[in-house]
Image (cartoon, rainbow, N blue to C red):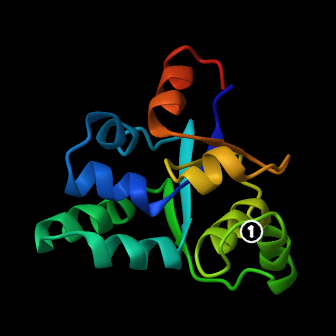
Amino acid sequence: MRNMRICIDSCVFIQGLGQGDPNALRLLTLFGSDLALVIPRLVAQEVTRNLVTAEQVHLFYRLFHESTYAFIIDEPVPVKLVAKYVDLGLRQKADAFIGAFTEWVELRYLISDNRHFLRELNTNAFTVLDADLFLERWDKDSL
């Protein structure tokens, strides 16, 4: 099913823009009426801190500037929801915040290769997939 909204973890942006990972890069080209991207400002800050060149940072922000289907959200995530994800075993500073954000904004998928999300998080609020598996399912239209 198409027409969905997703969050992408900073590691996937860094793999695509900083390391040239082909699947991560391809994922960053899919935004449109069938797929919207929504990330918290925290992810944007982490990505820009970890990209090496000004051109990589420019490419990152251009994704949001050139697409009407990509958004960076500055609103604070409810503290109780962050605490829920800490209780589920995620690190409080970043991972619990991103998990809470994904649920709070009611996104369908969190795309990440972070082992804490992929192997350790157990939630029914959203599905965690790595970029490869997301693209495989996207191509088969089986999301």
Q: Does residue 127 appear in this view?
A: yes
In-image side of 23 versus 83 (left or right) = left
Q: Does residue 109 appear in this view?
A: no
In-image side of 32 versus 50 (left or right) = right
In the picture shown, does residue 52 fall above or below 121? Answer: below
Q: Position of residue 44 (x, y in %)?
A: 42, 73
Quarter of the image with the N terminus is top right
Q: Check disc 1 and report its element: helix, strand or loop.
A: helix
Q: Position of residue 31 (x, y in %)?
A: 45, 44
In the picture shown, does residue 4 fall above or below 77? Answer: above
How crowded is the residue under tag 1: few (<14 C-alpha within 10 Å), some, or many (20+)?
A: many
Q: Position of residue 124 (x, y in %)?
A: 85, 46
Viewer-proximal residue, 16 or 105? 16
Quarter of the image with the C terminus is top right
In the picture shown, does residue 105 fall above or below 24? Answer: below
Query: Residue at 30% across / 79% down in the picture?
Result: 49
Viewer-proximal residue, 89 or 136? 89
User: Outermost residue, top direction?
Assistant: 140
In-image side of 132 versus 29 (left or right) = right
Q: Amino acid at mark 1?
A: Ala
